[in-house]
């Protein structure tokens, strides 16, 4: 009877740790995708910094899979979303600096999440080995 209660408790702990691990893995994937978008943005800003003409034609995404043709009006400044409701004008250099800070934060967050996932994997492995020892 006591072994049964202990087994149930360990099974609950395993499920809880597995849910935590899955949550951290989901967060990791979201932050990693965001970091990929930041790299693309930085590359685009670097290309702008290296020079484009104000009348060069570009494609402007307007949602989903749809874009329209456009041209640059001002190649010296860009509009940067700093939060959900605020967009500010920055120079390309200021924008690159802002993106670099965000990339650094994302990398730090990815490192933290990866460490948490590894710790939880280790704990899951230990509980799993306990289960196998009791079954064998």
Image: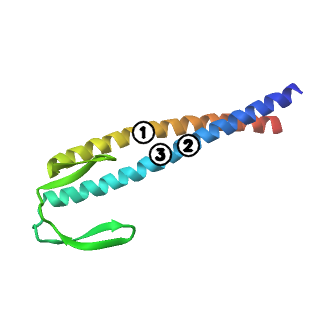
Report if residue 5 is visible in the image.
yes
Identify the element where label 1 is drawn: helix
Residue at 27%, 73% in the rendered image: 68
Question: Quadrant where the N terminus lies?
Answer: top right
Residue 53 pos. (x, y %): 10, 67
Which residue occupies the foreground of this view, 73 or 44? 73
Residue labelled with disc 3:
28
How many numbered marks are there?
A: 3
Q: Residue furthest right?
A: 1
Residue 98 pos. (x, y %): 23, 44
Estimate how packed mark 2 is, as few (under 14), some (14 to 19) or many (20 or more) residues with alpha carbons within 10 Å: few
Question: Quadrant where the C terminus lies?
Answer: top right
Residue at 41%, 39% in the rendered image: 109
Residue labelled with disc 1:
111
Estimate how packed mark 3 is, as few (under 14), some (14 to 19) or many (20 or more) residues with alpha carbons within 10 Å: many
Point out the frontmost of discs 2 and 1.
2
* 27 sits left or right of 74 in the view: right
Residue labelled with disc 2:
23
- The picture quadrant where one finds residue 21 is top right
Estimate how packed mark 1 is, as few (under 14), some (14 to 19) or many (20 or more) residues with alpha carbons within 10 Å: few
Which residue occupies the foreground of this view, 69 or 98? 69
């Amino acid at each position: 009877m006591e072994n049964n209660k202990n087994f149930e408790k360990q099974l609950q702990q395993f499920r809880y740790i597995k849910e935590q691990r899955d949550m951290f893995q989901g967060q990791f994937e979201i932050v990693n995708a965001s970091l990929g978008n930041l790299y693309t943005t930085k590359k685009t800003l670097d290309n702008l910094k290296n020079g484009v003409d104000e009348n060069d034609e570009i494609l402007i995404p307007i949602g989903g899979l749809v874009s329209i043709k456009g041209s640059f009006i001002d190649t010296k400044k860009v509009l940067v979303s700093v939060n959900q409701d605020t967009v500010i004008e920055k120079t390309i250099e200021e924008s690159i600096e802002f993106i670099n800070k965000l990339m650094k934060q994302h990398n730090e967050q990815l490192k933290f999440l990866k460490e948490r996932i590894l710790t939880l994997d280790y704990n899951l492995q230990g509980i799993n080995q306990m289960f196998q020892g009791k079954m064998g």
